[in-house]
Amino acid sequence: MLSIAVVPGDGIGPEVTEEALRTLDELGLGIDFDILDEVNAGRYLRSGVALADEDLDRVRKAGSVLFGAVGDPRVRSADYARGVLLRLRFDLDLYVNHRPASLLHDRLSPLRDPARRPIDCVVVRENTEGLYSGAGGALHQGTCHEVAMDEEVSTYRGVSRILGYAFSVARREVCMVDKSNAVPHGGRLWQRCWHEAIARHPDIGARHLYVDAAAMKLAEDPTGFDVIVTNNSYGDILSDLTAVLAGGLGTAASANINPETGYGLYEPVHGSAPDIAGQDMANPVGAILSAALLIGHRGYPAEARAIRAAAAAAIAACRCTPDLGGSLGTKDAAAAVRAGLG
């Protein structure tokens, strides 16, 4: 039996996660859900605990976690979000952030030219190094002489394995994005690993772009991209751009995975949206498609494709939330997706 840990989290997280679980139940796979509903801002405010050791043990046992959202306006410190998401990423070594972007319906694209709308690509983002590794420090804080340093960390192992993963999921081409003309030390390492990866995968196309040029070309014509691979910070930015080009953050799903161990964290990228929490207004598609990513990686690719097709059909019929052109609330929009699974 497939077991999945579930962290509903904060804000709209519990609402959209509940609909994602109902959608998985509709498939009749007999999945066992271990719901960690105590991992949230409320507990953090009471106890200072973001993610307890026993919570992490339950996630390890399940192997995969479906995550709702983290973030609460009552929590001022970034330590809470880092203590949940970044601890899961680093402790489970989820070095791949896999962000697919596929246009669900033509009307969702912000591009004027219909020929350039059907984006269908994946941003592969290195997830455990780079600027988000926490290296750095500050001097003379709170004074007019304050100096702040955030250090970008790249290792041969980290860069090589993210490039290898990118080639493993490519259909026709991998585009490596960096800024090696301005960031020389890490840039040289990425370039070295890039050329080694190309040599190991002669049957897959390869090209290189600087990050500013990549952003420009994505906005001009995203249909030219298959797999984009890049570091943590550039990937964070470019994956949000591809999400908007595919219809908006409300439909964006993500997977944080370790392909070797099989551990994975799957979450919609829209955040906790506390201003609409509890009002049956949140778009459930991102959470539902994140659940589809999860079961696809856990051995049910046909069922994952069925969920994606049902979501696309519901959106095409305008059986969706207002941000996608419909008029339904969270529950009814999710029910419309499930209706397409019958």
Image (cartoon, rainbow, N blue to C red):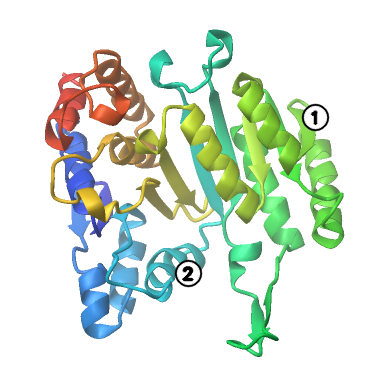
Towards the viewer: 70 or 122 = 70
Write down the residue under mark 1.
202
9 displayed left or right of 93:
left
Give SS at disc 2.
helix
- Residue 178 at x, y = what percent? 75, 47
Q: Which residue is mark 2?
A: 91
* Of 234 and 200, the residue lying toward us: 234
Residue 126 as seen in the image, left or right of residue 244: right
Residue at 73% from the left image edge and 40% from the top image edge? 212
Q: At 29% from the left edge and 34% from the top edge, which residue is drawn?
A: 285
The answer to whether residue 307 is left or right of residue 25 is right
In terms of secondary structure, where does tag 1 sit? loop
Camera-side mark, 2 or 1: 2
Quarter of the figure with residue 46? bottom left
Give the residue displayed 77% in from the left and 30% down from the top: 206
- Which image quarter: residue 329? top left
Where is residue 14 shown, x and y percent of the image? 19, 52
Q: Which mark is residue 25?
A: none
> Mark 2 Cα within 10 Å, few/some/many (few <14, many 20+)?
few
Q: Outermost residue toward the front?
A: 144
Q: Quadrant of residue 22?
A: top left
| Mark earlier in primary sequence (2, 1) | 2
Q: Residue at x 34, y 70 (%)?
A: 56
User: Can residue 175 be seen in the rendering of this structure?
Assistant: no
Q: Amino acid at mark 2?
A: Asp
- When the figure is inspected, residue 241 is found, relative to residue 188, above or below; the finding is above
